[in-house]
Every structure is written in C-alpha cells, then in structure tokens.
C-alpha cells in the first residue's frame, strides 16, 4: 500500500491486526467516513468486523485496547452508522455487537459498554426487521443482553425516572413473529427479565406485560380449541398423527412456558388469576360438566382431560393448582360464571346468562369429579375417555404443587405420607361433622363420602354425655362465626374458590392414609372387568396404565376390603382370559411365537406421556395400516385378537400376584437344556460322541457368521434345543469352536427345488423388551450329497418339533392348561390349512413346517449329541464316557 | 479479501435451519463463527464466537442457505429447549475432546434431541478442539463408536485451526438435501426447519454454475 500524499499518520495501516495500533487505525477510518456512501461501504463493513475481532482479542490479551475504545467513545460512531439505515452495514453492526457482548469477559469492560444509554438507543432503533438476517442478529443481540441482566446491571437498561425499559418494550412487540426462533428467543428474554430482583423494575414489568400475559392465555385457549377441532374430524393415520403431534407440542410448550412464568414470584399472582379465570375454569372445567348454553365453546371430554393432565404434570405453582383442584373436587357448576363463545370469527369470554336454571342438576355437588368417574363407564363405545381419565388420576398423583392436604380432604389417595393425628382428634372432628350436618347441605354431601353410620355410632358411645353437649354448643358458635366471615362478597374467582374450600376444610377430618373414595376403585375395577368380556374395546395401553394407577393407589391405601375385592376380580378375569386363549395353545402352530412376542412386549414400559399422550387422542385405530403398534390400537383379525388377550392375561396375572404378594416362578417361560449349560459363540466343545454333518454355509443376509456370498465350511450339530455350527479347533483334535448358536424352535427348514443337496435355513432370534423377533441367520446349507442333506433335514425338522413341544409344555405349565399332542386332537376351534398368517410384514420368513409322520419314527439315539463346555485343563483331553441318549417324551 | 457477509436478498433454493447443542464451553459459538464467516482468523490467542450465523453452500448445483442458531444459556428453561429442537432440520452435537465430562453428557443431550425433534432431524456428532492433542481425554475411537452406536455422523474439528469445520456443516447439509430428494421431509411444514427460497419454484431448472463438489459458495473465496 502506498502512502497517500498529505495524509496523516493515523491512516497508515499497521501490519498486526491484533494490536492497539490497529484499533487506532480503525478509529481513523470511522472518523474519516462518517457519511456512508457507495464508495466507502465495504471499507466500513470491514472496519466494523475488525473492531469486533480486535476488541475481544484485547479483552483476552491487552487491556489498553478496550480503554482506547472507550476513551474515544467509539460506540458513538456505531450509532451514527446505524441511523443511516444501510442494510449491509447494519447486518455487520449487529454481528459486531453480538460478538462484543457474547465474548467479553471483564465486568468493567461490560459496564463501560452498557453506560451512556447507547445500548438502549440500539435496542430502540427501527431496524429493517423484514430482513431475516437483521432480525436474527437483532433478536440474538437482545437475548445476549438479557443474559447479562442482574440487580447490578438492570439500571443500565431500565430507567426508573423516565419510566423507560426498551429491552422489555421492544421484545414484547415481537412475541408473535412468524419465525419460530424469534418467538422462542422472546420467551427466553422475558423469562430472564422477570427473574431479576429489582422492585421498581418489577412494578414496571408487571404493568407492561399485562396485555401480553392475557394474550398468552388466550392463545392457549385458541390452541386448545383448534386442536380439539382437528381431533374431532381426523382419522387415525400416520400423517394426521404427525400433524397432531405438532399441534400438541406447541400447546405443551406453551404450558411449560406458563409454568415457568408462574415459578417467578413477580408475575405469578396476576398470571395465576388470568390462567384460572380465562382457561382452567371457563374452558377445562366447563368441558367436563354438562353443557348449559348452546353457544358455549367446549372441548371434547378427552381433550379436556388431556389438557388438564398435562397442566398438572407440568405446572407446579401451588396456588394455581390448589384453586383448580379444589374447584374440580368440590365445586358445583355455579362456579362457572363465564364461557367462551365465537363472535365475528373471534373467541370472546362472556358472562354466562342462565335464562332458566335446570334446577337440581345444575347445582349438583362435585359435578366435575363425578365426570371423571363417569369416564370409566365400560358401556362406552371405546376406551379413549377411560385412558385420559387414568392419565388425569396419574397426573394428580404426580403433581408437584404440594396439594396432598387437598387431595386427602377429597378422600383421594396421596402418595406422600401425611401427618399422623391422634385418635381423639379424629373422633372430635367426626363428632363435629355429625353435629353440623343438618345445617349445611354441602357439608353433609361431603360427610357422606368419608363417614359411615357405624362410625357415627361409635363416636357417640366414646364420648361422655356432658362433653357432647359442650361440643355441640361450641360448634354452633364456630358455625356462626364462619357465617359472619363469609358474608362479604368475594372479589374474584380465585379468592372465591379458596374461600369456599377454606370453609369446607375446617369441617373435614384431618388427612387419613386409609381413606379413599370407593367409587374411584369401582371405576378402576371396571377396566379390569371389561378386559374379561368378549368384544371389549379396551386397548392394551389402557390396561397397562390402569394397572400402574392401581398400584400407585395401593401403595398409599391400606384397605383390606378393597384389596380382597380387587384380588378376586383379577382372579375371575384371569380365568376368563385363560379359558379363551387356553383353547388355542395346543392347536395353533404359531401360538408359541405369539406368546413369546407378547411377553416381550408386556415387559416394556409403554407409559411415557411425551409419546402416548397425544397418540391416543384420535379415534382408536383397528388395523395395522394405521402404523400403530398393536398395544396402542384395537386388534384386527384372529391372530391379533389372541395376541391382545395374551397381553391382557399377562397384565392381570401380574397385578393379581402383586396383590397377593406372590412372585411368578413360571414366567418368563424357561426350558432347561437338561443338565447342560447353554452353548455360546466362541465356546470350545468336545465333538466326541457327537453326530456331525459337514456342510458349506452361504449366508443370504449379513449376519454374525459372515456376509452374503461367503462360503463357510462348518459342521452342523444339534442338542435338544439348539442348532449349532462349529469349526474344528486346529489345536485340539476332536474339539471345535462354536461359530453360531440358534434355537431349533425358531428355525425353519426348506429343501431347494432344484438342488437336492441344499437346504434353506432361517433362524430367528428371541424377542425381548429391546428387540423384536427378527432373523439372525438366513443361509443356504450345502451338503456333500443328497443323503446327508436328507439326514440333516430330518434332524433339524425333528429337533424343531421336539424343541417346540418342550416350549409349549412349559407355556402350558405356566398357564395351567393341559398339554395335548396336536396329532391326537380330534378337533380344533380353528382348523384351516389354508389360513393366511395375518399381521406379518410382507415377505415374512415365518412359515409353518408341516409334520412328517415318518420322521417321528426315527430310531432312538440316532440324533443324540453330547456336548461339553470347554475343558478347564488346557493341556489335557479328558475322557468322556458315553452318555445315554435322551428320548423325547411325546406322550407325557 | 474474504467473502462479505451474506445479505438476506440473495436467491437460494432452500433454507436449512440448524441448532448447535452440547455443554457450555465446548466451543459451539466458535465453531459457528468459524463456519459462517471466514473473515475471522482462527488464531490461538483469540477465542471468539457468535450465537447466530448464516452462509450459502452449493450442493448438487443448488444454492442452499444454512441458518445456524446456538442454544447457549437456554438449558434452564424446559419450554425453550423443547421448542428449539422442534424447529431444526439439522443439529450439531458438540463435545470437547479435552473434557471427559462433556462426552459423558452426550447421551442426555441426544435423548432430549430425539424426544423433542422431528424424527428426520439429521444429527452430527462433533468432537471439538482437536488441536489440543496433548490434553486429549477422549479418544477419537470412542467418538466414532458412540456415533456408530447411535446412528450419527462423526467428525473431529478445531475452531482454532479451522480443521474440518467446513466439512461438519456441509456433510449434514448434504444429508438433509438427500432426504428432501427422497421425499422424507415435508418441505411445506415449517416445523421441519426447511424453507423454500424466495425465488424457487418446483419446476425451475437447476441453476447454472456452482461447485459440483459442494465447496464454497455465495462469492469468491480466498485465503
């Protein structure tokens, strides 16, 4: 670069881009180019970029760099450039500002950058936010600044005297921006702002977020109604479930956000009132009670139960949950004073005007809780309401808002242990209830839930007569005082609800760990009962959730009567299911696979509401075409009905044994390989006395043995249960290394139509909670001649029959049904040789192998194999006496 | 002179949205800056990063705009983290090879990503700070094994030396583009993190020029 004639020294560009001299040069560039033109645009962009780099370098290496930047008020140049509105320059300016505030480490440097109100001028500037990069850098800048907020820095942003807080005011304008990352950043920034402990700023923030919070709740209402409309009309197919997932995720994200705002004391009170009066009461509670106005916008019951459950699982703000649950558990519909209606294509919250009350029905106590119980009516068309009713009960258990006292007062089981109270206090409380029952209808209604006539008699017998009279007098006085207190008109819904509950709780017994509303068990029992009926519409996931909820309740409720009746019910239902599936154990060739598959599925815990929460909202699917797994839909066809009944049986059996405290020694089903340990790949086994068949194995698919096209010389050996491929151990004559082990029961064998020396063999791996049933070996076995091939086929076919017989025997033992040899069965409930196996994927390798009567007449001992695990004496070959052959007990 | 920063009006076929996730201090914002803005020099006495960046790349002759968002500081708010995952087409999951704990936390990050993202999000595993070999605590083979086990693409990078930074972003973009061609991504659904470009129509022919190997795009590159 040549020195310009007459230019000052400050325009000489230093070589080191990270130095104080370079910053001085850049300051000169800014000074000389205050007016942005086409000619200097690129120079200025580079200058701004380089300033970011050199300042952060200085922050990390040389403090004098930052000092110079501040002394020369260089931020002022930034503002002058910004105000000229040149897009490329403003993109660069915002990037530079992002880098400065994101990377600066020294607090004093940060404070200097924040001083003189320059940052507020940048925040307030009207950038061209339609440019997506300007918007992205701008919102990132605001977010970075929000993370710098704390009591020490808040006053750089909030001016109490002039009542200005640009960061808050500007960010509120963007809450509905079309780019999702911007909307997310807005939420993040607001959460950061309201958490700062500064009283005057909080007052300002509360005032200026009022409208925002109200619109937030109203958008929750809108999202809920729109999602509900979709659910009502959509078919249960994959595309709709994916669209639904997006809608549900938006809604749950919003509930999470509201929950996080409710955790911030500053905004919690006003937000709680909004969410209670604009969402929980007029939408959720209204939707789980009888309709009173034809114009009301209501959710379908399953949507309402779902949102209610999600709200309880996510939000932990005590007052909000307490108010909501107390209304749900105790209130009448008179609590509902407003409803949502549609007006000029908008949703409006309006007072309810009841032209003519319907009388008794409208004023029924605890109408909302009754609705929950009715969700379990097994006469309903499907189990959707029952599923979400269970989800709600589960959510009440899991709620983190510390409302155990409230739940106990409603005779609802509580997971946490409540405080033990003395017997005398309990008796006194019960006496008070009895004596005041005639005064308060509402109290009597509650009393009927928790106190039985017998207990009342006991109370009177326990207390001397003169004390009884004194207590009666005291109760009258207390009641009078309560009446006086409650005379003033409540000022808002929240305090009204709380006031009502406060009155009620004073007159209720203290929490008791043995209390539980009997109707709750009746409701849960109805699901157990339903799965034992033919043509029920219960899906396995619903039963699984019901068992989970029952177990939770039984952990906290010690009631012998309930325990006994549940055990008896499980026993009866299990027998019913057994009588159904039992008739197919011996006759259906594939029952073994069905049972093993369903047992593996049964062991998986499917209750994860992040996944199943929304998948069950659409109408129950009944075919595999819906892409839903069987446990989340209704069965289609014979095989699926049996599979579903098997999994029902397994759940009921488990619940029954949990109730009786009895372990299950028969499941999972095991067949021991007589007295030998199972062989594993890599074992070294003694081939002495083993019948070997040499063959070349050609895998057709990639597997542990090799890849397609490989030709592997192996020996085929079998024992009672296993198909084993070995390779001779070159270091020890008569011993071999195991290369593959598979179960004979899961092996299918077919001859090759064109080559009599070839067998096609497929071995499936066992299903487990992690893996579905799938082939682990698909290969051709090529033998030296057709005689050996025939011998191998007979051995494998015979072995498969034997192994399957042993497994089915074990299943029969576990189920408690007699084992019957299919060859001797005179009839089967379904005997159709042409039946197509349903539910299998196209191209399924599972095939039925026909029984050959000739092979079953093989000579005893001909196919026996004696196998030993690797010898522990490395240098010595032990003597192996000949073992007597084991014969299969076909008729046992 | 390096390429100038992107200006929003340039035409492109698609916009892909990315997030970068991983523990604090693994170098996410440095990687982001290093990829989106070659004007900044990767030198050892300077650690510098940014939370947002955008850049053009060319894949199969198509101009693709990559928009990358860092999630720094958001971990404390569940509502924020859930939302971030759902709007992205690609994610770079970053750990620091000199800090064993950042590798140990990968399972938790991946679990969150899988649970909250759309099922087609492309995830690349990045072992960053490969220039600090003397302080390495996580072997390359361990990163490779983790990626293989979880079905991720793997790469070690260094924002300081710019090693592999380019490849890390472009490889994921190629994967996303391939999924679009296969019809896996529904490009009409913004929640997938993919947008059609401002001058794109489905029947438009391939734009001429561009580097067929998917190298630098959007301007002349140098140094």
Image (cartoon, coloured by chain):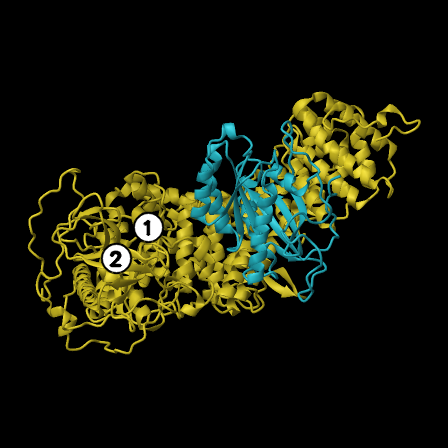
From the top left corner, tell me how far across and down residue A683 is, in percent: 23, 46
Q: Residue visible at 37% across and 56% down?
A: A707
Residue nearest the viewer, comparing A334 with A719: A719
Residue A553's label in the rendered image is 1
Is A573 placed above or below A712 here? below
* The colour assigned to chain A within the rendered structure: yellow
The disc, 1 or 2, on the residue closer to the chain's N-terminal end is: 1
Q: Colour of chain B?
A: cyan
Q: Calculate the distance from the C-alpha at mark 1 to the C-alpha at mark 2.
A: 12 Å
Residue located beneath label 2 in the image: A566
Instruction: Look at the numbered disc 2 and give the secondary structure of its residue.
Output: helix
Which quadrant does the N terminus of chain A fall into?
top right
| Mark drawn on residue B82 | none
Residue A752 against residue A718 in the figure, above or below: below
Q: Residues within 10 Å of mark 1 (few under 14, many from 20)?
A: many
Query: Measured along the vertical axis of the image, is residue A546 above or below residue A107?
Result: below
């Amino acid at each position: 670069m040549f020195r310009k004639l007459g230019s000052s020294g400050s325009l000489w560009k230093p070589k080191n881009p990270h130095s104080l001299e370079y910053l001085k040069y850049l300051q000169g560039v800014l000074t000389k180019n205050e007016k942005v033109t086409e000619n200097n645009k690129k120079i200025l962009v580079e200058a701004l970029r380089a300033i970011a780099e050199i300042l952060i370098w200085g922050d990390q290496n040389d403090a004098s760099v930052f000092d110079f930047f501040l002394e020369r008020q260089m931020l002022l140049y930034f503002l002058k450039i910004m105000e000229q509105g040149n897009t490329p320059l403003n993109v660069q300016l915002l990037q530079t500002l992002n880098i400065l505030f994101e990377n600066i480490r020294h607090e004093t440097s940060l404070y200097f950058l924040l001083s003189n109100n320059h940052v507020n001028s940048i925040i307030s500037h009207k950038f061209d936010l339609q440019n997506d990069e300007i918007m992205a850098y701008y919102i990132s800048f605001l977010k970075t600044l929000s993370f710098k907020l704390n009591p020490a820095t808040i006053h750089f942003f909030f001016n109490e005297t002039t009542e200005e807080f640009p960061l808050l005011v500007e960010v509120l304008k963007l809450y509905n921006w079309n780019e999702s990352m911007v909307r997310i950043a807005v939420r993040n920034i607001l959460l950061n702002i309201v958490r700062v402990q500064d009283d005057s700023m909080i007052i300002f923030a509360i005032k200026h977020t009022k409208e925002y919070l109200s619109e937030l709740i109203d958008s929750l209402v809108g999202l809920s109604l729109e999602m509900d409309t979709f659910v009502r009309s959509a078919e249960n197919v994959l595309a709709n479930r994916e669209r639904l997932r997006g809608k549900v995720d938006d809604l749950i994200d919003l509930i999470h956000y509201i929950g996080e705002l409710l955790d911030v004391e500053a905004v919690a009170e006003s937000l709680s009132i909004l969410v209670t009066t604009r969402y929980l009461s007029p939408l959720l509670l209204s939707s789980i009670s009888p309709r009173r106005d034809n114009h009301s916008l209501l959710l379908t019951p399953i949507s309402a139960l779902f949102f209610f459950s999600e709200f309880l699982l996510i939000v932990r703000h005590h007052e909000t949950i307490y108010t909501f649950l107390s209304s749900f558990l105790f209130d009448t519909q008179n609590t509902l004073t407003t409803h949502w209606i549609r007006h000029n294509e908008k949703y409006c919250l309006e007072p309810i005007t009841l032209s003519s009350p319907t009388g008794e029905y409208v004023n029924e106590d605890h109408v909302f809780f009754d609705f929950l119980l009715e969700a379990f009516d097994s006469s309903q068309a499907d189990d959707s309401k029952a599923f979400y009713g269970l989800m709600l009960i589960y959510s009440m258990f899991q709620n983190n808002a510390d409302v155990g006292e409230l739940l106990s007062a409603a005779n609802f089981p509580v997971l946490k242990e409540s405080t033990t109270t003395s017997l005398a206090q309990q008796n006194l409380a019960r006496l008070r209830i009895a004596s005041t029952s005639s005064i308060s209808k509402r109290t009597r209604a509650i009393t009927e839930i928790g106190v039985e006539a017998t207990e009342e008699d006991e109370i009177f017998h326990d207390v001397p007569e003169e004390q009884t009279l004194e207590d009666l007098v005291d109760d009258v006085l207390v009641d009078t005082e309560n009446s006086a207190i409650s005379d003033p008109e409540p000022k808002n819904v929240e305090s009204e609800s709380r006031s009502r509950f406060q009155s009620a709780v004073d007159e209720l017994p203290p929490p008791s760990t043995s209390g539980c509303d009997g109707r709750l068990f009746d409701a849960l029992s109805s699901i157990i009962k339903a799965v034992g009926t033919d043509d029920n519409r219960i899906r396995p996931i619903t039963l699984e959730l019901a068992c989970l909820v029952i177990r939770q309740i039984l952990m906290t409720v010690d009631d012998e009567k309930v325990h006994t009746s549940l055990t008896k019910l499980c026993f009866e239902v299990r027998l019913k299911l057994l009588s159904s599936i039992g008739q197919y154990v011996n006759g259906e060739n594939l029952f073994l696979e069905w049972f093993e598959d369903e047992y593996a599925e049964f062991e998986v815990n499917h209750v994860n509401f992040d996944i199943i929460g929304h998948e069950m909202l659409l109408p129950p699917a009944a075919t595999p075409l819906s892409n839903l797994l069987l446990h989340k839909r209704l069965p289609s066809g014979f095989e699926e009905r049996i599979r579903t009944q098997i999994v029902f049986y397994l759940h009921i059996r488990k619940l029954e044994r949990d109730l009786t405290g009895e372990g299950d020694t028969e499941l999972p089903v095991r067949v021991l390989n007589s007295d030998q340990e199972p062989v594993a790949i890599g074992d070294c086994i003694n081939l002495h006395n083993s019948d070997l068949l040499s063959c070349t194995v050609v895998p057709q698919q990639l597997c542990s043995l090799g890849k397609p096209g490989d030709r592997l010389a192996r020996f085929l050996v079998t024992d009672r249960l296993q198909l084993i491929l070995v390779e001779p151990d070159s270091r020890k004559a008569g011993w071999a290394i195991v290369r593959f082990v598979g179960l004979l029961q899961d092996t299918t064998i077919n001859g090759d139509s064109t080559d009599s020396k070839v067998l096609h063999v497929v071995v499936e791996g066992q299903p487990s909670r992690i893996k579905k049933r799938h082939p682990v070996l698909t290969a051709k076995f090529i033998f030296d001649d057709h005689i050996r091939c025939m011998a191998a086929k007979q051995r494998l076919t015979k072995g498969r029959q034997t192994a399957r017989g042993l497994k089915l025997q074990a299943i029969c033992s576990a189920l408690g049904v007699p084992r019957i040899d299919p060859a001797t069965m005179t009839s089967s409930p379904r005997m159709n040789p042409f039946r197509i196996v349903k539910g299998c994927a196209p191209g399924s390798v599972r095939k039925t192998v026909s029984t050959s009567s000739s092979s079953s007449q093989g000579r005893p001992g001909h196919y026996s194999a004696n196998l030993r695990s690797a010898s522990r004496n490395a240098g010595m070959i032990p003597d192996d006496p000949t073992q007597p052959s084991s014969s299969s007990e076909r008729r046992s | 002179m390096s390429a100038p920063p992107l200006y929003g009006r340039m035409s492109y076929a698609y916009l892909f949205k990315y997030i970068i996730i991983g523990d604090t201090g693994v170098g996410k914002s440095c990687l982001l800056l290093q990829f989106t803005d070659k004007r900044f020099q990767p030198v050892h006495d300077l650690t510098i990063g940014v939370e947002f960046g955008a850049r053009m790349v060319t894949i199969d002759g198509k101009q693709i705009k990559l928009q990358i968002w860092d999630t720094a500081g958001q971990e404390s708010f569940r509502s924020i983290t859930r939302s971030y995952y759902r709007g992205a087409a690609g994610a770079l999951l970053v750990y620091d090879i000199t800090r064993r704990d950042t590798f140990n936390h990968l399972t938790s990050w991946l679990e969150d990503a899988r649970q909250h993202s759309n099922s087609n999000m492309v995830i690349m595993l990045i072992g960053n700070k490969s220039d600090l070999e003397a302080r390495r605590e996580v072997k390359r083979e361990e990163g490779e094994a983790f990626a293989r086990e979880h079905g991720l693409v793997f790469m070690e990078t260094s924002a300081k030396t710019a090693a592999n930074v380019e490849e890390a972003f472009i490889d994921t973009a190629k994967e996303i583009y391939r999924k679009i061609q296969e019809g896996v991504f529904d490009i009409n659904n913004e929640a997938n993190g993919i947008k059609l470009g401002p001058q794109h129509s489905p029947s438009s022919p391939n734009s001429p020029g561009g580097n067929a190997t998917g190298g630098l795009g959007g301007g002349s590159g140098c140094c």
